[in-house]
Image (cartoon, grey):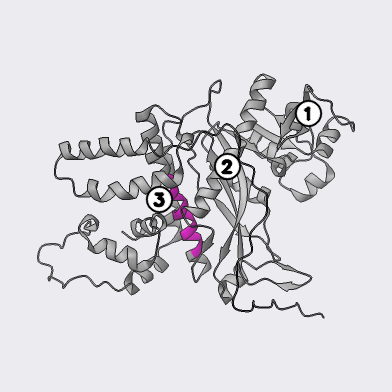
Amino acid sequence: MVIWLIIFQRLHPKGTLAVAVREMLTEPGQVLPRQAKGQKRRGRLSANTSAYSQARSRMPLEVVEEVSDLIFESLAQQPKLLPGLDRPMFLLDGSSLLLSHNKALVAAYPPASNQNGVSHWPVMRVAVAHDVVSALATRPAWGPMYGKQATSEQGLTKTLIARLPARCGVMGDRNYGVFSMAYHASSQDHPCLFRLTEVRAGKLNHGATPNAKTDRRIRWVPSRDDLRNNPEIPADAFVEGRLLVFKVVIDGKRQKLYLFTTLDLPAEEILNLYGYRWNIETDLRSLKREVRLHMLDVQSPAMAEKELVLGVAAYNLTRAAINDAATALKLDPREFSFSLAQDTINAFLPLLANARSERERKAIMKEMLRVFSYSKLPHRRKRRSAPRIVWPHPSPFPKWKVSKPRRG
């Protein structure tokens, strides 16, 4: 019941504890266990949130993680594959989340700091892995972004790769185009496709920047820095793969794209496959904006971790509904707007909960699919180009001044 209520909070636009408790008291939420025979009848349930708040705090993180894994595994039993691939591909990326400011959270997830002082909000670094086609996400990995115990995206991804489905492929941008990521993916039988920086591509090409249309097999061996920063990698380790270079046009500018892969596919198919990497950006936006994970309003590190894990579970349940609708309508799941699909689900769930017969339920599902067909993203001939500029917000009050770190 507690897990269901936390997931409901993540999917509700308001998402407060009071909203979740009141939903439980309504007719669609009457899934409470019945009283045993002979048990003294209790009064009506209270609408106060204190008991629910205490239950959230006492629930072990291990239970939350197990539930999240079960949801993902049940939804990913029949993976959808890209044309020409015999395995699912997962997109790797990292992001950051803000947390409420209190002593415990500041100690566990220190805020950012620079020469001007220390920021106010604690920051959590998160690494995620999303399926290219279905957009389903595995349980994330997290850690502090700043401070003495700060974690890197690559360090978090090492644990993330270990819980991916067997033999699936992984894909990442230049931040993941390092030897440690290629080694950990290959050692666990996960073919990889990573973008490289020009400097790293040159080192793999015997010190010379490779030309466009390069497609040659290489043996990637770790450098001294790779071995020092990743002590678990043996000194004689290596990864067999291919170095590919393409000339592409990105945002109207011609540039070279350097890729390393262990996939055995033609060069053009590798280039087309890497084009799907942008999907992870829209997935992260859905997690932060629609599931409201951009900032976790919690009071303890343990609660922040549970909210994060169940927030991803709530996202997966919405994605599962989108995938089912896409199958019924014979469309690509990526053609749907996550926001509009979530609005459709929230509108029809009370009707489905109050359906009196199977015939009525089927009629509601038919109408729900019709509305789902209006939840598609627009097909624009030209991508909208908006400048990376933020309009200033009017502020009638003076801003807090950050405290400068003490010297000595």
- Name the residue type under label 1: Arg
N-terminal label among 3 and 2: 3
List the single residue furthest toward the left.
38
Residue 347 image position (x, y, % from top left):
31, 49
Contact check, label 1 and label 3, Cβ < 8 Å: no
Per the image, label 3 sits on a secondary structure element best described as: helix
Which residue occupies 12% across, 70% down? 41
Q: Nearer the viewer, residue 99 or 231?
A: 99
Quadrant placement of the C terminus: bottom right
Per the image, label 2 sits on a secondary structure element best described as: helix
Quadrant placement of the N terminus: bottom left
Q: Which residue is mark 1?
A: 219
Please indicate whether residue 380 sits to the left or right of residue 355 in the image: right
Q: For marks 3 and 2, give the one nearer the viewer.
A: 2
**What residue range appears in magenta?**
304-316
Spatial separation of the CA atoms under disc 3 and disc 2: 23 Å
Q: Residues within 10 Å of mark 3 (few under 14, many from 20)?
A: some
Q: Which residue is mark 2?
A: 280
Q: Which residue is mark 3?
A: 67
N-terminal label among 1 and 3: 3
Spatial separation of the CA atoms under disc 2 and disc 1: 29 Å
